Amino acid sequence: MRESWHADRIEERRSYWREERLEPGKTFRKERCIEIEGQDRREVEVDVAAEVSISIRLNGETVATLSPLPGLLREMAVGFLICEGLVDCPEDILSAEVGEDDIDCWSLDREEGDGWLCQCRACGSGPLAEKPGWPGWANRDTKMKASVLLGVVDQLNSKALLWRRTGATHMAMICNADGRILAACEDVSRSCAVDKTVGSALLSRVDLSRCALVTSGRLSRAMVAKAFFAGFPIVVSKAAPLESGIDLARRVGMTLVAFARPPRLYVYAGEERIIDQE
């Protein structure tokens, strides 16, 4: 069996850890396949990511069925409820109990007339920009250096242990203005990676209004809406933005950075928060 088979085939090779060991049976399992190279065929053993199906229930009602990697499911539920605008803040979540195939969450009841959050979650439609008091309203005082963000993006691959084994995951991280990583999670779903990362940070009482969300996934409207509801003023990706994501970021006053790959990055909205190196 060859280790780090995926990492060995990455165009830009770096120092990957062949001695790394992850526990099979939870996040990944061994599979045999046939490798064909020219006229040569041989059977090889590779690592394949293994997701689960789990439903999130809020106050007795199923609000989503997701297919994440096992692990950090309570964090994922907390992050999902916040990032989808289903609850206002982590303190409103009374409990989140992980069962065999569901996560049973209970929250404070909404006041009547607060249904606008549910109407505009995920797709980003609705009066997102009309709620300056909402925790997700972009913090206009938070600024970050381009060099700091590039340094954080450069760590996406090095922290993605399962990606190096399987090539099947996305990575999300949260950093502060000093470039310190405050939370980091990977998952087969870019959305679940963000939910788990946000949930982990919020349960540790991180102030997301002073942080940036950094992800390996595309910045669609849904992803930007997640960042907005969580309270991030800045969202960064090494991948591409979509027109809908750019439009939403501009409407709500967020900073959107994409194609962040050393030595450059591209700012599509809110350039005033990205400052030059001193």
Image (cartoon, rainbow, N blue to C red):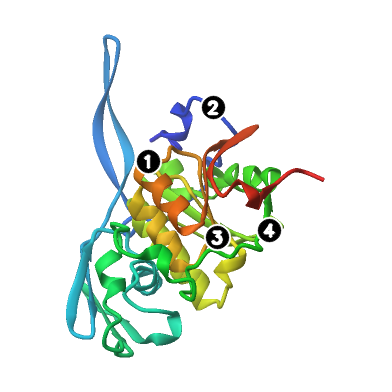
Image side of residue 101 versus residue 129, left or right: left
Give amino acid for label 4: Ala
**Which numbered marker is on residue 12?**
2
Q: Are marks 1 and 4 in contact (CB under 8 Å)?
A: no
* Secondary structure under the numbered disc 3 in the rendered image: loop
The span from disc 1 to disc 3 (Cα, nearest Å) is 18 Å
Q: Whole-percent x and y of residue 183?
A: 54, 63
Question: Eyeballing the image, is 11 above or below 155?
Answer: above
**Mark 1 surroundings within 10 Å by alpha-carbon count, few (fewer than 14), some (14 through 19), many (20 or more):** some
Name the residue rendered at 55%, 28% in the picture.
Answer: 13
The span from disc 1 to disc 4 (Cα, nearest Å) is 25 Å
The span from disc 1 to disc 2 (Cα, nearest Å) is 25 Å
**Residue named by callout 4:** 177
**Residue named by callout 3:** 233
Q: Whole-percent x and y of residue 211?
A: 59, 62
**Residue named by callout 1:** 242
Identify the mark nearer the N-term, 4 or 3. 4
* Secondary structure under the numbered disc 1 in the rendered image: loop
Name the residue rendered at 51%, 57% in the picture.
Answer: 253
* Residue 262 showing in the rendered view: no
Image side of residue 166 versus residue 151, left or right: left
Q: Which of the pair 163/128 is nearer the observer?
A: 128
Identify the mark nearer the N-term, 1 or 2. 2
Give amino acid for label 3: Pro
The span from disc 2 to disc 3 (Cα, nearest Å) is 31 Å
Q: Nearest to the eye among marks 4 and 3: give it.
A: 3
The span from disc 4 to disc 3 (Cα, nearest Å) is 12 Å
Question: Eyeballing the image, is 43 above or below 59?
Answer: above
Q: Are marks 1 and 2 in contact (CB under 8 Å)?
A: no
The span from disc 4 to disc 2 (Cα, nearest Å) is 28 Å
